[in-house]
Amino acid sequence: LARAWLDAKESLEAIGPALDFATANNISLAKSADIATNVTSQFGKEVEDLESVMDVLTATAATSNTDILQLSEAMKFAGPTAKALNIPIEEMSATIGVLGNNGLQGSLATRALWTSLTRLTKPTTEMSDVMNRLWLDFFNAQGEFIWLNETIGELEKGFAWLTPEQELAALTTLFGAE
């Protein structure tokens, strides 16, 4: 804990939750501390948030087809992008869990997701044409990302009248072929 960014007092306060995190996920205390501090800092959280971050990660690992090491690996790609788009850790962790349930685990799960989300921040002309034609808007009036669950809702509305072939073409244009 002290090797990360916690001072001595903070390290002592975090040791109990880190030990619980290690036990719940069957990993070493050192690995527990590494995962918890990395993910906490990736999301721009503070030391006070360490325990809740560990709880979120443990819940995802316990309820999805991804273990804590795969989840940690996935967060390496997802965390910084999620922070930039203001996606809460709870939503990103749950999304990674859903991807794991569908066979996409670890960095494989989030590399494609990261690519897709970053493409939306600077759409090509072709992407903008598809977004306009389908009335898709992934950012609110303040320019903030609308979160993943709302993105899926936008896609469902926009794709309601499309054939499966048209859906696939639109998805490939918007999010890439990876």
Image (cartoon, rainbow, N blue to C red):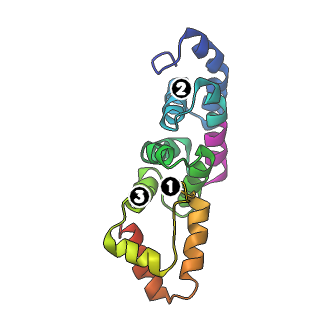
- Please check the rendered image and state whether residue 57 is part of the magenta-colored stretch, yes or no: yes
Callout in the foreground (3, 1): 1
How many residues crowd mark 1 within 10 Å: few (<14), some (14–19), many (20+)? few
- The answer to whether residue 66 is left or right of residue 16 is left
- The answer to whether residue 121 is left or right of residue 88 is left
Residue linked to disc 1: 143
At label 2, the amino acid type is Ala
Residue linked to disc 3: 121
Magenta residues: mostly which secondary structure?
A: helix
Please, what secondary structure does the residue beneath circle 3 have? helix
- Please check the rendered image and state whether residue 43 is part of the magenta-colored stretch, yes or no: no
11 relative to 140, above or below: above
The structure residue drawn at horizontal position 49% and vertical position 87%, both measured from the top left corner, is 164
Q: As rendered, which of 21 and 159 lies closer to the eye?
A: 159
Point out residue 122 in the picture as x, y percentages from the top left corner: 36, 60
User: Magenta residues, as a range?
Assistant: 55-65
The structure residue drawn at horizontal position 33% and vertical position 75%, both measured from the top left corner, is 126
- Residue 65 in sight in this render: no
At label 3, the amino acid type is Thr
Point out residue 130 in the picture as x, y percentages from the top left corner: 42, 78
At label 1, the amino acid type is Gly
Indicate the quadrant containing the C terminus: top left, top right, bottom left or bottom right: bottom left
How many residues crowd mark 3 within 10 Å: few (<14), some (14–19), many (20+)? few
- Is tag 2's residue or tag 1's residue first in the polypeptide sequence? 2
The structure residue drawn at horizontal position 41% and vertical position 59%, both measured from the top left corner, is 112
Residue linked to disc 2: 33
Callout in the foreground (3, 2): 3
How many residues crowd mark 2 within 10 Å: few (<14), some (14–19), many (20+)? many
- Is tag 3's residue or tag 2's residue first in the polypeptide sequence? 2
22 relative to 172, above or below: above
